[in-house]
Amino acid sequence: MSPAPDGVLVVGASAAGLAAAEALRRKGYAGPLTMLGAEPQLPYDRPPLSKQVLSGAWAPARTQLRQPDVLSTLDAEFVLGDPAVGLDAATRTVVTAAGRVLTAEAIVLATGLRPRTLPGQDGLAGVHVLRTLDDAVALRQDLLSASRVVVVGDGVLGAEIAATARAMGLDVTMAGPQEAPLLYQFGPLPARLLADLHAANGVTLRLGAGVTGLSSEDGRVTGVCLATGEVLPADVVVVAFGAAPATDWLSGSGLLCDNGIVCDSRCRAAEGIHAAGDVARWHHETLDVLLRLENRTNATEQGVAVADNILGADRPYTPVPYFWTDQFDARIHVHGILAADAEVTIVDGDPAGRRFVAAYRQGGEVTGVFGWNMPKQARLRRPEIAGRAAPVGGKS
């Protein structure tokens, strides 16, 4: 093991950053520790934002990952509400929007994602993205006085928001370029079942056509314009068609950024600098690819792996990817990689009964497992995945 660094700075005070900080302390690091966050809140969980917080089932405070008294035991300095705006990798120095200059022997970059937006949406009332706790609170407030909502996005986030808004009693339309929700992520069978699920619950699907812009009147959105020429009327529009790694602030830093912060198999971007969570694109040795994962489980597991390597473990990070999504009465769990050209076989249950497990195979080997309302059975199939690696911990 290498000697512990004299000072660690974690840039990004959310799940991945907190996991790294806690793992450092748990594994014996006793030196200075600073957590720098762009948002004013203490670390909180993002998955509940599109479901429990948006629906009102949870108060926003319930999303906190740790209570303040627990965080105090970390013996860390929290610098919140002050985003990083620059990094010098050679000197490991970070500059913040407020002019702070922070230097550390080891830096963890966990800045996450920033939502993609539509042209003309900035400053237009009634148009929302959903990434932060403040976003969720603002969107819920607008939904409470709305009747017609258009969700621009047919991926995981868009589908979750559509399901939540529909359960709140709103007239919901989902728009996006795919022929069915999550078609590119899951393949034809699950995507078709998701389309049927949303339609059966009253969501109007306007899929297979691109969104070209927004219509408005007196500074407030009135609809979503499709490439077909159709305009979908709306009181509220949620733009949820993806997000980009938050790396703009690293321009000129000396780090390589290409669809994320490019790292080696140890999640190391440069000497003394590691990345974790949605922003990290690292070399997965088992799969032999550069991989970037946008899910809660990876945020935690990669944060722990980064802490290990900062303390000298020198271990490659080779997880089996895993994520879940809840939409209406569907509980979907995915292990591994669901390749678009994979052969899909039902190995348990029956899609007609909305309880099944499917195996995804390439070259005769299982690369992924998909479970619909059968979480335990899907998890039991995880060892069948080719090139599998044991997870290092975290939520599952």
Image: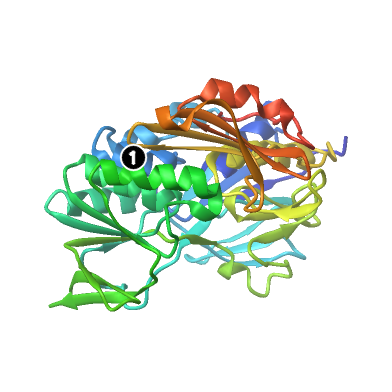
Q: At which x and y percent is residue 205? A: 30, 56
> In which quadrant is the C terminus drawn?
top right
Q: Is residue 17 above or below residue 268?
A: above
Residue plotted at (67% across, 60% down): 261
For the residue pair 71 and 245, the one nearer the viewer reads as 245
Is residue 121 visible from the viewing direction of this image? yes
For the residue pair 351 and 105, the one nearer the viewer reads as 351
Q: At which x and y percent is residue 23? A: 66, 32
Residue plotted at (49% across, 60% down): 243
Residue plotted at (25% across, 39% down): 55
Q: At which x and y percent is residue 115? A: 44, 61
For the residue pair 360 and 80, the one nearer the viewer reads as 360
Q: Is residue 224 left or right of residue 160?
A: left
Q: Residues within 10 Å of mark 1 (few under 14, many from 20)?
A: many
Residue placed under numbered mark 1 in the picture: 51
Residue plotted at (68% across, 34% down): 24
Q: What kind of residue is marked 1?
A: Lys
Q: How many marks?
A: 1
Q: Is residue 280 above or below residue 370?
A: below
* Quarter-of-image position of residue 54: top left
Q: Is residue 311 left or right of residue 100?
A: right
Colour pattern: rainbow
Secondary element type, mark 1: loop
Is residue 28 visible from the viewing direction of this image? no
> In which quadrant is the N terminus drawn?
top right
Q: At which x and y percent is residue 362? A: 73, 45
* Quarter-of-image position of residue 111: bottom right
